[in-house]
Image (cartoon, rainbow, N blue to C red):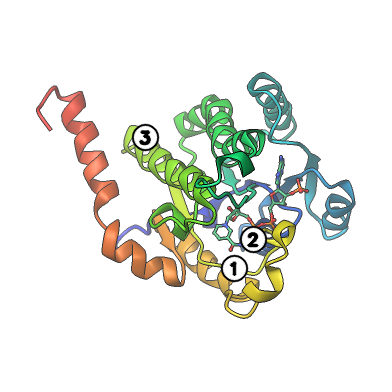
């Protein structure tokens, strides 16, 4: 009988950033129901939302991922001390801004930097902060998981949210490179690529009502995502993202792993 792929089905403790609404909230609540009965730590800024999740049996930590790298590393260190079984992190917190780069005076560069920081830099900082802990668990034979939430827009940009798409392309590349660096280890890198999904992401631009006519419901998205995660898939492109992934990205991650192996062996690419 073949061994099943390692998956979050064995996770003992799962931390979800951006768990106070949308995709993060829905996944966090579903993780709580997994047969392994993991501890689930919901992270976000809005305390009232965290309190509601605590009422449903989740652990909660109020945290702004936009803190300085040192502060974020320190905060995550405290979380690891409190939850030594933490073996899975879902890097989900994200924001989205619209920009028209043909109207430079309309582009607020502070918002550009904020979007890059929350969507990309804080993801990398979190990975780096948790790496030593995951390496310690892996040395004890435990499987660990970095689960990144990118987007279908990481593969084909939507030009009205150009910086957002660029941050997601960066996350996509980061996760492939990280997977290649961690190949053959017990630390696994999973990428979820959502399509347009029911959430609060688009509220600031007043487009939620229009988008709600075509988005995938959270219920369907959560089910499909959980199916992929529990199968142990490295890539979980959902809905429309699956077709785009097949057309442009299939095989790319394996190529990055191959490249890394050749590089280590001193071979040409
Ligand atoms: N919905 C879609 O159509 C779609 C499609 C593709 C990808 N995605 C990705 O899915 C992820 C989740 O988005 P969503 O659609 O579920 O949006 P959402 O409902 O707006 O949720 C975003 C979450 O991120 C958290 N967050 C934002 N800034 C934060 C900060 N500085 N520190 C800590 N937490 C912060 C928010 O919590 P607080 O405000 O409480 O901090 C909230 O819980 C994002 O990475 C998004 O890019 C979404």
Name the residue carrying label 2.
Answer: 23
Q: Find out if the beta carbon at label 2 lies less than 8 Å from the nearest ligand 1 atom.
A: yes
Q: Residue furthest top?
A: 70
Density class for disc 1 (Cα within 10 Å; few <14, some 14-19, many ≥20) is: many
Q: Which residue corresponds to mark 1?
A: 197
Q: CA distance from mark 3 to mark 2?
A: 26 Å
Q: In this rendering, would 198 be left or right of 233?
A: right
Residue 156 vertical position relative to residue 168 in the rendered view, above or below:
below
Label 1 beta carbon within 8 A of ligand 1: yes
Residue 211 occupies quadrant: bottom right
Q: Residue at x 55, y 50 (%)?
A: 100
Q: Nearer the viewer, residue 250 or 207?
A: 207
Whether residue 113 is situated above or below residue 188 in the rendered picture: above
Q: Quadrant of the N terminus?
A: bottom left
Mark 2 burial class by Cα count in 10 Å: few <14, some 14-19, many 20+ = many
Where on the picture, by quarter, is residue 15?
Answer: top right
How far apart are the alpha carbons under marks 1 and 3?
30 Å
The spot of residue 138 in percent (x, y) is 47, 33
Ranked by sequence position, the earlier of labels 1 and 3 is 3
Which residue appears at 43% of the width and 63% of the height?
237
**Few, some or many C-alpha atoms within 10 Å of disc 3 (few <14, some 14-19, many ≥20)?**
some
Image x and y of residue 157, in percent: 43, 55
Q: Answer whether residue 39 is visible to the viewer in this image.
A: yes
Judged by depth in the image, the label closer to the viewer, 1 or 3, is 1
Residue 86 in view of the camera: no
Q: Earlier in the sequence, mark 3 or mark 2?
A: 2
Position above or below: 224 against 47: below
Badge 1 or badge 2: first in the primary sequence: 2
> Mark 1 touching mark 2, by CB under 8 A?
yes
Point out which mark residue 182 bears: 3
Of badges 3 and 2, nearer the viewer stands: 2
């Amino acid at each position: 009988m073949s061994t099943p792929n390692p998956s979050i089905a064995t996770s003992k403790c799962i931390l979800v950033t951006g768990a106070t609404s949308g995709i993060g909230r829905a996944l966090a609540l579903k993780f709580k129901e997994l047969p392994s009965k993991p501890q689930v730590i919901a992270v976000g800024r809005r305390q009232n939302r965290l309190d509601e999740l605590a009422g449903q049996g989740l652990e909660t930590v109020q945290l702004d991922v936009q803190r300085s790298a040192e502060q974020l590393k320190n905060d995550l260190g405290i979380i690891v001390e409190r939850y030594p079984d933490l073996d899975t992190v879902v890097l989900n917190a994200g924001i989205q801004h619209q920009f028209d780069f043909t109207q430079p005076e309309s582009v607020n560069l502070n918002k550009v930097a904020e979007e890059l920081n929350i969507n990309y830099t804080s993801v990398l900082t979190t990975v780096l902060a948790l790496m030593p802990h995951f390496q310690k668990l892996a040395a004890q034979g435990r499987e660990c998981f970095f689960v990144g939430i990118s987007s279908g827009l990481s593969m084909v940009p939507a030009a009205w949210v150009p910086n957002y798409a660029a941050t997601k392309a960066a996350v996509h590349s980061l996760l492939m490179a990280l997977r290649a660096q961690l190949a053959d280890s017990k630390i696994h890198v999973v990428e979820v690529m959502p399509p347009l999904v029911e959430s609060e992401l688009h509220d600031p631009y007043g487009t939620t009502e229009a988008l709600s006519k075509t988005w995938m419901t959270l219920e369907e998205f959560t089910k499909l995502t959980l199916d992929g995660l529990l199968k142990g898939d490295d890539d979980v492109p959902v809905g429309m993202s699956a077709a785009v992934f097949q057309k442009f990205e299939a095989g790319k991650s394996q190529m990055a792993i191959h490249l890394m192996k050749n590089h280590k062996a001193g071979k040409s690419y």
